[in-house]
Image: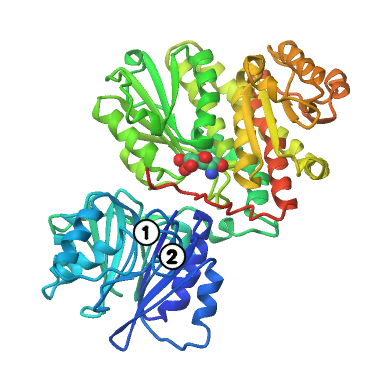
Amino acid sequence: MCGIVGYIGNNNAIPVILKALEKLTYRGYDSAGIAIIEKGKLVVEKKVGKIRELIRALWGKSYQSHIGIGHTRWATHGAPSVENAHPQTDEGKNFAIVHNGIIENYQELKEELIKKGHKFQSQTDTEVIVHLIAEYYKGNLLEAVLKAIKRLKGAFAFAVISTFEPDKIVAVKKGSPLIVGLGKGENFLASDIPAILPYTRNVIPLDDGEIAVLTKDSVDIFNFEGLPVSKEIFVVPWDILSAEKGGFKHFMLKEIFEQPKAISDTIGGFLSQDLNLPFDIKNINRIITIACGSSYHAGLVGKYWIEKNAKIPNEVIYASEFRYADVPIDENTLVLAISQSGETADTRFAALSAKEKGATVVGIVNVVGSSLDREADFTLYTHAGPEISVAATKTYSAQLTLLYLISILLAHKKNLISKEDFYNRIDEFKKIASSVEKTLQLNEKISDIASKYKHSSSILFMGRWLNYPTALEGALKLKEISYIHAEGYPAGEMKHGPIALIDENMPVVIIAPKDRVYDKILSNLEEVLSRKGRVISVGFEGDKVLKQKSEKFLSIPYTDEEWTPLITVVPLKLFAYHIADQLGLDVDQPRNLAKTVTVE
Ligand code: AGP
């Protein structure tokens, strides 16, 4: 999704902005641009495609500027093109803006501004903001911005600079994420933390309804009424190295190999947190989990754990569906809002609407200080470290880890298990990290297997019970990075439709650890074989029956049936990774996708 960067300070703005933009490319983008003020004039450079095109366009041009804004655009309104790329400017070239989010009433504003004589150059919704600011400018940029935002509907974050006041950047947040980075003699602005990690770890995350005015020596925050707001400085706990590739070909592979650490760190983080719940468990009669994509799949596994261990009914709903459905919610409902980024618009807005209806909202997030972290009633953190690849891998493992821990914490609070049992289970559970480590040794074997299936036009994934969500996750991972059509199904449902798809060309991945549904899924496997389907199975080491029935067998270490989803998903992530890599695709930044989806 779009990325915003801003710089003001003693150094040349261009290299700082380009480097910061590169750190945001993992979010997904189709064009990029930069605006600086040099010798009192606005200079704008924009390119379609990768950041390197923008860098090439700037080669040999010895611009020197101490203020600038940059942007990576992921098209919503208007196709990817130079005209539609940001920064957008007014026709007088006195104001430049970069913007994330959507201005819902842009059409009516555009018509109004055209009648007043403004000339538009793009199809974007963004352009209305810069024209509005130019229209309202009467010698004070902050006042013009305050006036303009009163006219805007939608969720947005933007940064604006002006030749009239070349010593400041004004930035606004309402809905989309925006953080200020604090330096010495310089200050930064970005839509995501990795962009400014090379320069500072001291940040101020802006809240919705706030405006920041950055000069090289100061940062002042105001509300939308123009009144000053005091904010705390937050120190980012990550180091820059953890956001680099560290010798791996792709971030995705690196992050797959970081799963054992993500699991151990999440257990460690959980144990060091205050485990007194800020609500009375006796009052909770229902849990609703809201999430999107992989976080939704983690929530589905969590449902089985919570219902089994804590005996509380747990419904899992896509956040984008929840918001507009009439789900009965009251103060006895506990809502788990899961989002690794903490910025996913669907999840945030669903969480806010649940909160309005009286539910207690628990955020399960990986990014401390993110919007959901701040908006939830309280947060439990996954400790996966920064995840750069668009495909969620280690954050999914960390979410599963935390959901299991939550399930037994709730069980303990309900007196269903003793304190001793609670801690004993956690001690046992810690061993999962080394089982994942062992499973990663399948890497080379899976690379070989991937080469045999990479030209498939479709692949089915089947699992049952706790590993039905694993099938969904395996299919999502494959389709998002390899562009091969994939479906995840509960294996028992196969006979109700998908079985019609099976023939000698259809690979079927069957997840079959020896658990309570093992015999059932073996019968499903037989159904696939009788239709000549090609079975790739994931099962416990030493499972001769499964191995003998499969074209390819991926053996995972024996694990308690309850914890298998943390292990079975590992080979599926590697399978998707190697197929995409062998097809020569952009593994970390798959087409059309964004890491942080901040539009509804
Ligand atoms: C996962 O591989 C996807 N890229 C995507 O489905 C992701 O899980 C989803 O967009 C939710 O993101 P979040 O966890 O940051 O809210």
Q: Is residue 360 above or below residue 178?
A: above
Ligand 1 has an atom within 8 Å of the beta carbon of the residue at disc 1: no
- Quadrant (top left, top right, bottom left, bottom right) of the C terminus: top left
Give the alpha-carbon distance from disc 1 to disc 2, as whole Å: 8 Å
How many marks the image carries: the answer is 2
Q: Is 233 on the left-hand or right-hand side of 116?
A: right
Q: Is residue 400 above or below residue 240?
A: above
Ligand 1 has an atom within 8 Å of the beta carbon of the residue at disc 2: no
Q: Which mark is residue 211?
A: none
Q: Residue at x 15, y 65 (%)?
A: 115
Quarter location, residue 319: top left
Of 132 and 587, nearer the camera is: 132
Task: Answer yes or no: is residue 383 visible.
Answer: no
CB contact under 8 Å: marks 1 and 2: yes
Q: Is 535 on the left-hand or right-hand side of 323?
A: right
Of 471 and 402, nearer the camera is: 471
Quarter location, residue 219: bottom left
- Where residue 190 appears, as percent x and y from the top left, is 39, 61
10 Å neighbourhood of mark 2: few (<14), some, or many (≥20)?
Answer: some
Of 78 and 535, nearer the camera is: 78
Kind of residue at badge 1: Val
Of 136 and 386, nearer the camera is: 136
- Where residue 138 appears, as percent x and y from the top left, is 11, 73
Q: Which mark is residue 200?
A: 2
Q: Is residue 379 above or below residue 310?
A: below
On the image, numbered disc 1 is attached to which residue? 203
Kind of residue at badge 2: Thr
**Mark 1, secondary structure of its residue:** strand
- Where residue 73 appears, as percent x and y from the top left, is 43, 60
